[in-house]
Image: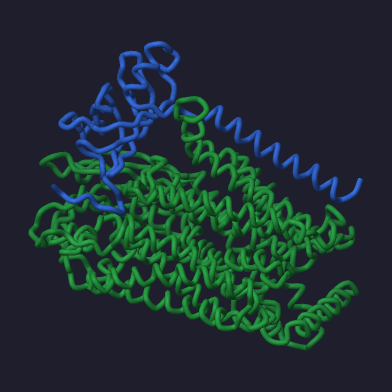
């Protein structure tokens, strides 16, 4: 199997190289046989990388421990789900996974892109081939998963216990899918530059890709938060660690891109900016892999340090130079068609939204790289931690939240005072009422008050949009309210799907606010002893240590400690936390013991219990108890966001058939609705 | 004043604010990240490094870990091969913490030469790439 894998990789190298060259030549000359060849090499590349992936999977499933990668990542007693997940849990496997998915996306882009963009496709194929070529080269020359050992171990090393978690089985592929799918919009942007066809065509062509990539990134980041929360046992989900930041950076620039392309579509502005943003997103996704894989910045999520860092660095430098030159040479073609007419307009809102998102991205990048920067300029490493990131990003994040509310409510080009009154009066009033209620209710944390008031403001604005839209349909078409609601969303998926995504973001913010009110204590308890902790809502929680039990499970020895929880004297239930010692199939310990936090999740708060250890020979246990308000809402926000994204993406909503006619029709309906609504 | 000028002023304001927040944030929250040898050298010439927040990276000296579960404290020594500092930490150390493991100690250097840690981060060989057992 390794021979087959290695052979497929060699073939992939040749195909990717051929596809890169022939794609560029085909794009330049337009010769049909070359265009066909470029397309076929993209498809063939997908085929051979699929074969290589299957080869690795077979080696994993058959426990072929003579293959180094299999021996390092798995063991006989590892559950099958994690044996399959080992495909992407190690370094060289994850690179192969990356190359494979990229080639799949590249082929899908060739197959699904409508014919009217055919002039772009050879270039798109060439760019995806170049990127795949880089990954295949790195695999072949620095980190192949098909290396064999000189001997065959009786059992493998086993998977790190912290990775043996359902969240971890799906979090990395989601994040990878997000990272990788950025390459497709990026390839279209480069193709547009290369072909000098810089109208809005490429932006229409990638609309769904951009959204898809953004949804994957959001899900990946959120699942990463969830995994950190349930598995790492420190009681939080975001620590501004370099690896977390690396996943956040492309999300920020993609979010900015998602908004700024709308300005280009509607008003022909921001052409240069959009090209730069998508290039930045792509570079940041590569950069993210670079910092997580190279060990250049010390991180608790330390990955193996290896030579692949240099491959990434070289690729980044070459890419930046090449893209910089390409952009420079095409600048004259990227002039703006219209100018900003008023500061009080939708496009101005988008501009500030972009500015803030990029501001956050820049500060996160700066803070992440600050140890290196300070070493270069001052000779000593200075690090910044969560206090820095929170100080900078909470105010910017809140400004962004405010814009989330204002942006969709004000008109394009120039909002009239009447437009502003009509849309902003009610939400502003509701936000103000919430702020007053919170202050009179005794909440003193300034940022929390602002965040909750803004959350109310944004939500009210969105609800108002839905109510008015449904009302207008009801009056115009005589539909009942439920049908009107469904059709309102169905006929304007992009707009109302976007609103649903905004609701998801508001829900995230609720969860973030909750973290400002967490309470925590550590205690050493004998069986029967009780520790008490007060929640942010003023309830008294009593944790009574019940005892410790020990037993053997599938691939681990478990020491479990349980507490009974009472709230204000009322029994809530039992929460148990475990220390797990993983063993190989001979019963030998295979990793440092890991902690499994006990979590009791609720709408208002989570009880988070960590069993830190027992005092030798006794049943006295050391615990950390944390009460985390509103954490659940972060995960719920993720669900709402994905739902909104899916509504926006659902086929048929976009201009797939009869594009111009459809858009004109949609526009006239809006005018009618506007007039009717104004009369009322 | 046209919209473009107004926007440029607005953008400049945003940029300056972000820059200010970042500069202040680094000034107030940035801490030195030093290896024991660097720390020993710096502290010899600059006593102001005592009793301020620092981060020290290094390796846990094998056999130096003394866990007092009842008092919830862990004492150990951290080294970079040249200099060694004793560390006292009250709290729960991460799962990956053990002999010879690479750690980052966050805390203050006391005038008696002890690091009083407020947080200990431990790097295992890697979470994602297991090191084969010798």
In the image, residue A522 above or below residue A313:
above
Is residue A339 or residue B50 the one in the foreground?
A339
Q: Is residue A604 left or right of residue A506?
A: left
Q: Is residue A183 left or right of residue A468?
A: left
In the image, residue B92 above or below residue A77:
above
Q: Residue at x 40, y 17 (%)?
A: B42
Q: Quadrant of the C terminus of chain A?
A: bottom right
Is residue A581 or residue A182 the one in the foreground?
A182
- Give the total number of marks visible in the rendering: 0
What x and y, as percent, mark residue A495?
A: 69, 71
Q: Is residue B81 left or right of residue A127?
A: left
In the image, residue A69 above or below residue A488:
above
Q: Is residue B66 left or right of residue A193?
A: left
What x and y, as percent, mark residue A200?
A: 73, 70
Residue A426 visible in the displayed image? no
Q: Residue at x 24, y 38 (%)?
A: B101
Q: Quadrant of the N terminus of chain A?
A: bottom left
Q: Residue at x 50, y 73 (%)?
A: A106
What x and y, as percent, mark residue A579?
A: 22, 51
What x and y, as percent, mark residue A379?
A: 46, 25
Q: Quadrant of residue A276?
A: bottom right
Q: Quadrant of residue A459?
A: bottom right
Is residue A645 or residue A18 the one in the foreground?
A18
**Tint of chain A:** green
Q: How is the image coloured?
A: by chain
Residue A577 visible in the displayed image? yes
**Tint of chain B:** blue
Q: Quadrant of residue A197?
A: bottom right
């Amino acid at each position: 199997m390794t021979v087959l894998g290695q052979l497929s990789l060699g073939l992939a190298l040749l195909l990717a190289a051929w596809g890169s060259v022939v794609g560029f030549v085909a794009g330049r000359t337009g010769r049909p046989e070359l265009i066909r060849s470029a397309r076929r090499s993209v498809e063939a590349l997908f085929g051979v990388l699929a074969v290589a992936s299957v080869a690795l999977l077979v080696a994993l499933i058959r426990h072929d421990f003579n293959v180094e990668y299999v021996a390092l990542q798995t063991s006989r007693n590892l559950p099958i789900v994690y044996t399959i997940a080992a495909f992407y849990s190690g370094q060289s496997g994850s690179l192969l996974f990356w190359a494979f998915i990229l080639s799949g996306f590249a082929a899908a882009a060739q197959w699904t892109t409508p014919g009217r963009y055919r002039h772009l496709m050879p270039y798109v194929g060439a760019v995806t081939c170049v990127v795949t070529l880089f990954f295949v080269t790195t695999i072949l020359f620095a980190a192949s998963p098909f290396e064999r050992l000189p001997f065959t171990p009786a059992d493998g090393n086993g998977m790190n216990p912290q990775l043996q978690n359902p969240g971890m089985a799906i979090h990395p592929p989601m994040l990878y899918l997000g990272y990788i799918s950025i390459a497709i919009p990026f390839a279209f942007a480069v193709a547009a530059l290369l072909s000098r066809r810089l109208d809005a065509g490429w932006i229409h062509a990638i609309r769904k890709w951009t959204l898809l990539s953004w949804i994957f990134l959001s899900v990946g980041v959120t699942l990463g938060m969830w995994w950190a929360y349930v598995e790492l046992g420190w009681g939080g989900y975001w620590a501004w660690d370099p690896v977390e930041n690396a996943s956040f950076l492309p999300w920020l620039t993609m979010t900015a891109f998602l908004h700024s392309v709308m300005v280009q579509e509607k008003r022909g502005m921001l052409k240069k900016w959009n090209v730069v943003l998508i290039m930045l997103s792509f570079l940041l996704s590569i950069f993210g892999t670079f910092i997580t894989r190279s060990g250049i910045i010390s991180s608790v999520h330390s990955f193996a340090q290896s030579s692949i860092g240099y491959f990434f660095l070289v690729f980044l430098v070459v890419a930046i130079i090449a893209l910089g030159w390409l952009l420079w040479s095409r600048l004259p073609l990227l002039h703006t068609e219209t100018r900003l007419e008023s500061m009080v307009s939708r496009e101005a809102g988008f501009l500030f939204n972009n500015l803030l998102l990029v501001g956050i991205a820049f500060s996160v990048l700066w803070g992440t790289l600050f140890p290196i920067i300070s070493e270069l300029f001052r000779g000593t490493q200075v690090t910044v931690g969560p206090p820095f990131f929170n100080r900078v990003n909470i105010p910017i994040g809140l400004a962004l939240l405010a814009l989330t509310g204002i942006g969709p409510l004000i008109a394009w080009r120039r909002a009239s005072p009447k437009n502003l009154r009509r849309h902003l009066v009610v939400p502003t009033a509701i936000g103000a009422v919430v702020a007053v209620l919170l202050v009179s209710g005794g909440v003193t944390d300034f940022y929390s008050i602002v965040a909750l008031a803004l959350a109310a403001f944004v939500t009210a604005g969105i609800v108002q949009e839905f109510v008015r839209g449904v009302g207008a349909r009801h009056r115009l078409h005589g539909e009942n309210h439920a049908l009107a609601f469904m059709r309102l969303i169905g006929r304007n998926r992009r707009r109302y799907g976007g609103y649903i995504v905004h609701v998801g973001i508001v829900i995230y913010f609720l969860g973030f606010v909750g973290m400002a009110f967490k309470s925590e204590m550590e205690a050493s308890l004998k069986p029967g002893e009780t520790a008490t902790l007060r929640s942010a809502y003023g309830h008294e929680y009593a944790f009574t240590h019940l005892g410790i039990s020990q037993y053997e499970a599938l691939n681990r020895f478990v020491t479990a400690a349980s507490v009974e929880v009472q709230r204000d004297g009322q029994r809530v239930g039992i929460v148990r936390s475990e220390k797990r010692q993983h063993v190989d199939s001979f019963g030998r310990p295979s990793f440092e013991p890991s902690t499994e936090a006990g979590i009791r999740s609720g709408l208002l708060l989570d009880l988070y219990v960590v069993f830190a250890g027992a005092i030798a020979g006794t049943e006295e246990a050391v615990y950390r108890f944390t009460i985390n308000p509103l954490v659940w809402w972060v995960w719920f926000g993720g669900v709402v966001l994905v739902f909104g994204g899916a509504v926006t993406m659902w086929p048929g909503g976009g201009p797939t058939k009869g594009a111009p006619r459809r858009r004109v029709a949609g526009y006239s309906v809006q005018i009618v609705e506007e007039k009717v609504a104004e009369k009322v | 004043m046209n919209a473009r000028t107004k926007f440029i002023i607005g953008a400049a304001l945003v940029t300056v604010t972000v820059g200010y927040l970042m500069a202040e944030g680094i000034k107030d929250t940035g801490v030195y990240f030093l290896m024991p040898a660097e720390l020993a050298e710096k502290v010899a010439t600059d006593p102001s490094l005592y009793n301020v927040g620092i981060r020290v990276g290094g390796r846990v000296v094998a056999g130096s870990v003394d866990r007092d579960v009842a008092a919830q404290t862990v004492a150990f020594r951290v080294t970079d091969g040249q200099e060694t500092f004793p560390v006292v930490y009250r709290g729960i150390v991460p799962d990956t913490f053990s002999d010879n493991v690479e750690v980052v100690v966050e805390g203050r250097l006391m005038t008696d030469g002890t690091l009083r840690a407020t947080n200990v981060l431990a790097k295992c060989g890697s979470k994602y790439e297991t090191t084969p057992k010798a």
